[in-house]
């Protein structure tokens, strides 16, 4: 696709992952009505959320835990669904449970 830029980030995973970049319509996180919130005290650093995120906006650091790029997260909930210890919950944008 013309104009499509992917940046490959070095990772400990076997497969290279591309970092999201600003698209033709800008940052896409404003589309979401709910967002994932991580309890890093529960997180086991299994990397499943990072691997399954369709927008690749989750980064798991073995020392710091999970961080989410909310500029690109669309709130689909895949990360919360695949988390084996339920460390990720989906909350309504602006507060409350979603």
Image (cartoon, rainbow, N blue to C red):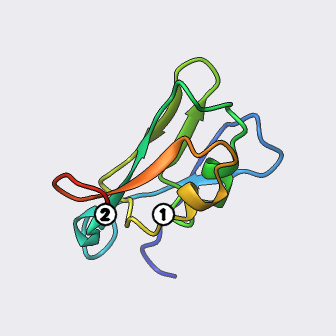
Query: Are the two marked residues, 1 and 2, in contact with CB atoms closer than 8 angstroms?
Result: no
Whichever of labels 1 and 2 marks the residue nearer the N terminus, that label is: 1
User: Whole-percent x and y of residue 22?
Assistant: 33, 61
Give the left or right position of residue 83, taking residue 87 as reference.
Answer: right
Residue drawn at the location 56% of the way across and 64% of the way down = 78
What residue sits right under mark 2 in the picture? Answer: 34
What's the distance in space between the residues labelled 1 and 2, CA to CA? 28 Å
Residue drawn at the location 58% of the way across and 30% of the way down = 42
Q: Nearer the viewer, residue 24 or 41?
A: 41
Question: Hey, which residue is sitting farthest right in the picture?
Answer: 14
User: Whole-percent x and y of residue 59?
Assistant: 54, 40
Element class at badge 1: loop
Give the left or right position of residue 17, taking residue 65 as reference.
Answer: right
Element class at badge 2: strand
Residue 5 image label: 1
Residue 73 image label: none
Question: Hey, which residue is sitting farthest left in the picture?
Answer: 94
User: Whole-percent x and y of residue 2?
Assistant: 46, 80
Quadrant location of residue 74? bottom left
Neighbours of disc 1 within 10 Å: few (<14), some (14-19), many (20+)? few
User: Which part of the image, by quadrant, shows the C terminus?
Assistant: bottom left
Neighbours of disc 2 within 10 Å: few (<14), some (14-19), many (20+)? many
Q: Nearer the viewer, residue 61 or 77?
A: 77
User: Whole-percent x and y of residue 31?
Assistant: 26, 72
Question: Hey, which residue is sitting farthest front in the picture?
Answer: 97
Relative height, residue 18 to residue 66 (above, below): below
Residue drawn at the location 30% of the way across and 54% of the way down = 71
Residue drawn at the location 69% of the way across and 49% of the way down = 48
Question: Hey, which residue is sitting farthest top in the picture?
Answer: 63
Q: Nearer the viewer, residue 74 or 9?
A: 74
């Amino acid at each position: 696709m013309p104009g499509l830029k992917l940046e490959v980030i070095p990772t400990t995973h076997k497969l290279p992952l591309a970092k999201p970049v600003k698209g033709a319509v800008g940052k896409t996180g404003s589309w979401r009505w709910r967002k994932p919130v991580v309890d890093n005290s529960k997180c086991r650093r299994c990397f499943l959320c990072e691997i399954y995120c369709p927008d690749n906006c989750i980064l798991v650091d073995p020392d710091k835990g999970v961080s989410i790029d909310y500029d690109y997260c669309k709130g689909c909930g895949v990360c919360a669904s695949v988390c084996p210890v339920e460390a990720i919950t989906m909350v309504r944008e602006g507060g409350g449970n979603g």
